[in-house]
Amino acid sequence: MLKRGSWRTRFGFYLLAVGSACGLGNLWRFPYVVGENGGGAFILLYVFLALAVGAPLLIAELMLGKNTRRSVIVATDVMGQKAKQPFRWVGRLAVLVTVVVFSYYAVISGWVLHFMTQFFISLFLDVEGAANKTNLAALMSNGWLQLMLASAHILITVVVVLKGVQEGLEKWISYMMPLFAALVAILLFKSFSLPSTPEVMRFLFYPDFSKLTLSSLGHALGHVFFTLSVGFGTMVTFGSYLREEDHVPTAGFRVALVDTLISLLAVVMIFPVAFQASNVPLTDPALMFEVLPRYLLGIPGGALFGLAFFVCLYLAALNASIGLLEVVVSNLVDRNKKMERQKATWLSGAAALSLAILPALSSSVLKSVRINGRSLIESLDSLLINWLLPLVALGILWAFYKGTSEKEKEISFIDREKFVSYSMYSHWIVILKWVAPAVILIGFLLQVVALFQNVY
């Protein structure tokens, strides 16, 4: 049996776990989901769910990985054997969702890569020439260019993951995260100086509960799981690399807390710029790529600011992509002990590239394909994140809960040196057994009701 890799340092784990969580989910997806769901009230709902439901599930997935020392497919198989229940489908569905999300995520990451390079070129062009280069419509009409950009992004991700846990993932993230943090700080300072900021702050932090819809609970849950990487098997994989002395609840809660804070920073950073550019709240997934470049090129120093913004966005996209691809690779290696990591990585990258063809062509060759008024890539995002991901997360939770004895849960959760872990343990068990399943099922049913209302 091959020796299981592990994190060189605890800080390395935190960097990668937070980096995986703080991807385009925070900087691209969360702002427009907030805009769609009315602002402040949705943010309150999101923060509550992230800490009350997302963090406990994240801890459970890390614990599942650490206790089994395997990725999600093998880990759920082990839980199924112990509980004598059929959990085989859970891990396989998690990996399937992961590879499909990575495929369309690569297309969006390709958009970011395109605008990043164009803003760099715009430093040497006149404003009119730069505006033509950063035109979203031109990019959207060229599906093959989108596929090439997605291929480049997948290739970059593959090269990092090929190196393994310590030499690839941990080392890369340790270099990248400080740069990411510095860029976020610069962009926050710039955003707070815009005239639109006071109005945006009222929209974001003065809750109007009348703006919530039947789908808001499902959308908030889906995004909590997406941004925390819960339900993909990512945290099961990362947990399998933890050292014996690492206390899982502490690690899980810290990752959830930092990720939630970065989500809030993301909307504060992006919303003022988007509102200043379009004079409407950010509600369209493509709006950031349409109005922001045009606006930034029209202000003094905008080309340099735009370059910093899209570099920051691309680093976030790459962070999350590394985590997603590592899940697929780790599961392939765990399932087939004869398969080398290098071969598994290239196979996973090739599978993601094949699946990326349809979303890459969704705005050109396949632009006539609309599902409930949405493009193919928007429909994929909604189906996977709002509908499938919470159900997969529920399946992994149930496999962990039924396949792990009460004694094993208690030993894994309680730290003898931290008295608070004794009191928190009972709350964690209640959330896993009753609260999380109830909230997920209610959110799912409310979305079904909303869907029927829209249809009829």
Image: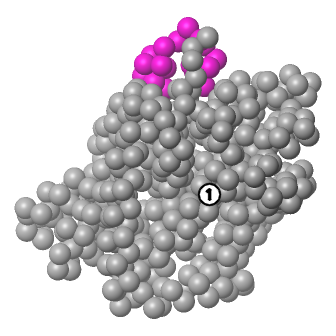
Magenta segment main secondary structure: helix
- The residue identified by callout 1 is 254
Judge whether residue 373 can be spotted in this image.
Answer: no
**Is residue 98 magenta-colored?**
no
Residue shown at 54% from the left, 44% from the top? 10
- The magenta stretch is 331-349
Residue shown at 24% from the left, 62% from the top? 307
Of helix, strand and loop, which one carries label 1?
helix
* Left-right relation of 304 to 114: left
Residue closest to the eye, 406 or 341? 406
Q: Which amino acid does the dot numbered 1 rest on?
A: Arg
Residue closest to the eye, 29 or 234? 234
In the rendered image of this protein, does residue 71 appear above or below residue 119?
above
Query: If the image is split into quadrants, where does the C terminus sit?
Result: bottom right
In the rendered image of this protein, does residue 245 appear above or below residue 221?
above
- For disc 1, the neighbor class at 10 Å (few under 14, some 14 to 19, many from 20) is some
Judge whether residue 422 can be spotted in this image.
Answer: yes
